[in-house]
Image (tube, grey):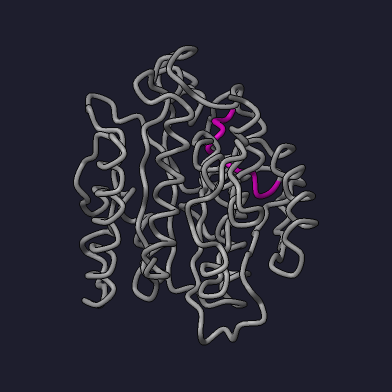
């Protein structure tokens, strides 16, 4: 399993060296250097000889260190687009030449390599830690309440508040004292890289990849739409809903238990984080959020990876009418 489940920084960088040789002029690698010294990669695949005006630009990214199947799924799709085969050597089912001629595809496979490198496991399958233990690894353990998950903050300063030891892997250091959750702060490498790339390609679509534990739920997969109270043009809203519906249907056909799409459910401070960091993006770009079950015996790592991969491939087929 390990040789096809690629989720660590060194694994990705080995594949990058191969892809650069194999893809030739169809690949472009951009980098955002994090405070921790890691390279946060944007991997763009396209036929660069085609005029930008004739292509649809899609951004595919994942911000969270504790959600490794998102990376593994992206890597397998990139492998197919570059080589025509998946990581197991099976022929791809997509028309990669059509995809590369009609689309600009940018992948950010590891949005927080600092956190990912501090993750104790390659993947989460429910056999090593309970969800409660997993959540303490993710956000850190409450200093004064052992076994309880610490707060979810957009940014914090270790000089100002009492923090877990160790700090949870979901957070990224942005200087000596401050940490951010990548998809809740524009100061993160995740957002900085997007803005760097968006200046080049002006993306029309963003597939935002995540995993969750679906605690007390039988569901394995879900597509979430932008917050209801963000004023989005009807055309963008309708496209998001149709896109989400197609991915949900694809999952069902592949035997996954799927919750129907619905808007992000956040309220209070968490909703404010989303409005602040995603509102402008959601008003101009079609964006949906993928959630695939994590750390559970009924959705093993290969199955997690397959669900992520399915959401990407269905998106490519939708945007190329294939």
Identify the main secondary structure in magenta. loop
**Residue in front for this viewpoint, 128 or 157:** 128
Quadrant that contains the N terminus: top right
**Residue in front for this viewpoint, 299 or 265:** 299
Please state the horizontal and vertical placement of residue 274, each as a whole percent of the image: 36, 56
**Residue in front for this viewpoint, 125 or 88:** 88
In this picture, residue 78 sits left or right of residue 149 = right
Question: Quarter-wise, where is residue 3 in the image?
Answer: top right
The residue lying at 21 percent from left, 76 percent from top is 234
Instruction: Confirm whether the magenta stretch covers residue 168.
Output: yes
In this picture, residue 37 sits left or right of residue 100 = right
Res. 133 in view: yes
The residue lying at 65 percent from left, 56 percent from top is 82
Disc count in the image? Answer: 0
Instruction: Confirm whether the magenta stretch covers residue 317.
Output: no
| Above or below 86: residue 150 | above
Please state the horizontal and vertical placement of residue 60, each as a whole percent of the image: 50, 57
| Above or below 149: residue 127 | above
| Above or below 47: residue 71 | above
Quadrant that contains the C terminus: bottom left
Please state the horizontal and vertical placement of residue 112, each as a whole percent of the image: 60, 44
Res. 145 in view: no
The residues colored magenta run 167-175
Please state the horizontal and vertical placement of residue 45, each as a whole percent of the image: 63, 65
The residue lying at 51 percent from left, 63 percent from top is 59
The residue lying at 66 percent from left, 39 percent from top is 114
């Amino acid at each position: 399993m390990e040789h096809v489940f690629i989720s660590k920084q060194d694994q990705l960088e080995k594949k990058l060296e191969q892809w650069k040789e194999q893809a030739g002029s169809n690949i472009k690698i951009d980098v955002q250097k994090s405070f921790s010294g890691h390279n946060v990669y944007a991997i763009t695949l396209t036929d660069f000889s085609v005029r930008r005006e004739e292509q649809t630009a899609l951004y595919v990214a994942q911000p969270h260190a504790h959600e490794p199947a998102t990376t593994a799924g992206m890597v397998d799709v990139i492998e197919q687009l570059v080589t025509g085969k998946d990581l197991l050597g099976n022929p791809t089912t997509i028309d990669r030449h059509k995809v590369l001629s009609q689309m600009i595809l940018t992948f950010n496979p590891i949005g927080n390599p600092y956190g990912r490198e501090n993750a104790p496991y390659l993947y989460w399958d429910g056999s090593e830690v309970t969800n409660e233990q997993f959540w303490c690894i993710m956000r850190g353990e409450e200093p004064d309440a052992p076994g309880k998950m610490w707060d979810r903050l957009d940014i914090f300063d270790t000089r100002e508040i009492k923090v877990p030891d160790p700090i949870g892997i979901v957070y990224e250091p942005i200087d000596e004292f401050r940490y951010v959750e990548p998809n809740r702060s524009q100061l993160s490498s995740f957002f900085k890289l997007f803005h760097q790339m968006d200046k080049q390609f002006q993306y029309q679509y963003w597939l935002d990849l995540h995993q969750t534990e679906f605690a007390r739920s039988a569901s394995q997969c879900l597509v979430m739409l932008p917050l209801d109270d963000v004023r989005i043009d009807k055309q963008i809203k309708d496209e998001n809903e149709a896109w989400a519906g197609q991915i949900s249907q694809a999952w069902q056909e592949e035997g996954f238990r799927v919750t129907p799409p619905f808007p992000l459910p956040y309220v209070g401070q968490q909703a404010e984080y989303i409005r602040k960091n995603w509102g402008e993006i959601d008003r101009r770009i079609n964006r949906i959020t993928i959630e695939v079950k994590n750390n559970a015996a009924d959705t093993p790592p290969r199955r997690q990876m397959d669900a992520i991969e399915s959401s990407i491939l269905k998106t490519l087929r939708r945007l190329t009418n294939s």
